[in-house]
Image (cartoon, rainbow, N blue to C red):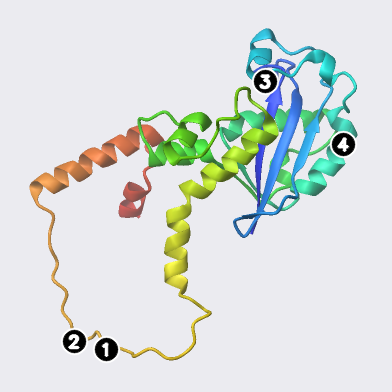
Amino acid sequence: MRQLFLDTETTGLSAEGGDRVIELGCVELVNRKLTGNNLHFYFNPGRDSHEDALKVHGISNEFLRDKPKFKDVVQEILDYVQGAEIIIHNAAFDVGFLNKELELAGQKPFTTFVDSVVDTLVMAKQMYPGKRNSLDALCDRLGVDNSGRTLHGALLDAELLADVYINLTRGQEALLIDAGGDEGQSGSEESVDLSGFVLPVIQANAQEQAAHEEQLAQLDKASGGKTLWRQAAAA
């Protein structure tokens, strides 16, 4: 599986209002291992960054003046992301800006070129309802070293996001490994007939059921009513 962790920096907060992408960073993982085949561009946006945006990313207007326009390297970007699973923190923001840049370059929307887009902010809200789930907060919670992040930067943030994602999904990976077994082992294992065993069924008591309902209610609130447990039960 080819996964790309993507982040952008922009001149402001509104793509429809005329703000543009000034930096794009992508980090590649194949089979959950860093490959070093990353992508990083700065762009001349043709306009100055808002003062508040400059405080976030620190990328000066002067620094960007000799950088390429997004449209000048758009084909290289599309060739790089083609068919990959894209992982972004707060994906709606970045994809919205990329769609506007692609539109201005005469290209189709971003999702046309990739396999799928995964939003780690949505993942984190489901896993940690009611808690802060910014990239910095997740780094602190998961033990990811972000001490070098004094300002936002697309490539650095993409690298941090890759580390955060691996930690977020580590339990899932372990389950898959356990289910698949160790293909490298040799020899035979004794087969046990379990048909004669009767497993006891222990029903949850009233207190446990109430605690379960309270937890589902919190998940419902955090996910906007999209709790997978309830959806599966209703299916």
Is residue 201 rendered to the left or right of residue 131?
left
Is residue 19 rendered to the left or right of residue 205?
right
Q: CA distance from mark 2 to mark 4?
A: 66 Å
Q: Quadrant of the C terminus?
A: bottom left
For disc 2, the marked residue is 196
Figure check: 64 above or below 1: above
Q: Secondary structure at mark 3?
A: helix
Label whose residue precedes the other's in the sequence (4 or 1): 4
Q: Secondary structure at mark 2?
A: loop
Q: Seen from this angle, which residue lies furthest top?
A: 51
For disc 1, the marked residue is 193
For disc 4, the marked residue is 73
Label whose residue precedes the other's in the sequence (2 or 4): 4
Q: CA distance from mark 4 to mark 1?
A: 62 Å
Label whose residue precedes the other's in the sequence (3 or 4): 3
Q: Residues within 10 Å of mark 3 (few under 14, many from 20)?
A: some
Residue 1 quadrant: bottom right
> What amino acid type is highlighted by mark number 4?
Val
Image coords of residue 11 (percent x, y): 72, 17
> What amino acid type is highlighted by mark number 3?
His
Q: CA distance from mark 2 to mark 1?
A: 7 Å
| Image marks 3 and 2: residues in contact by CB distance under 8 Å | no
Please tell me how many numbered marks the rendered image carries. Answer: 4
For disc 3, the marked residue is 57
Disc nearest the viewer among 3 and 2: 3
Q: Residues within 10 Å of mark 4 (few under 14, many from 20)?
A: few
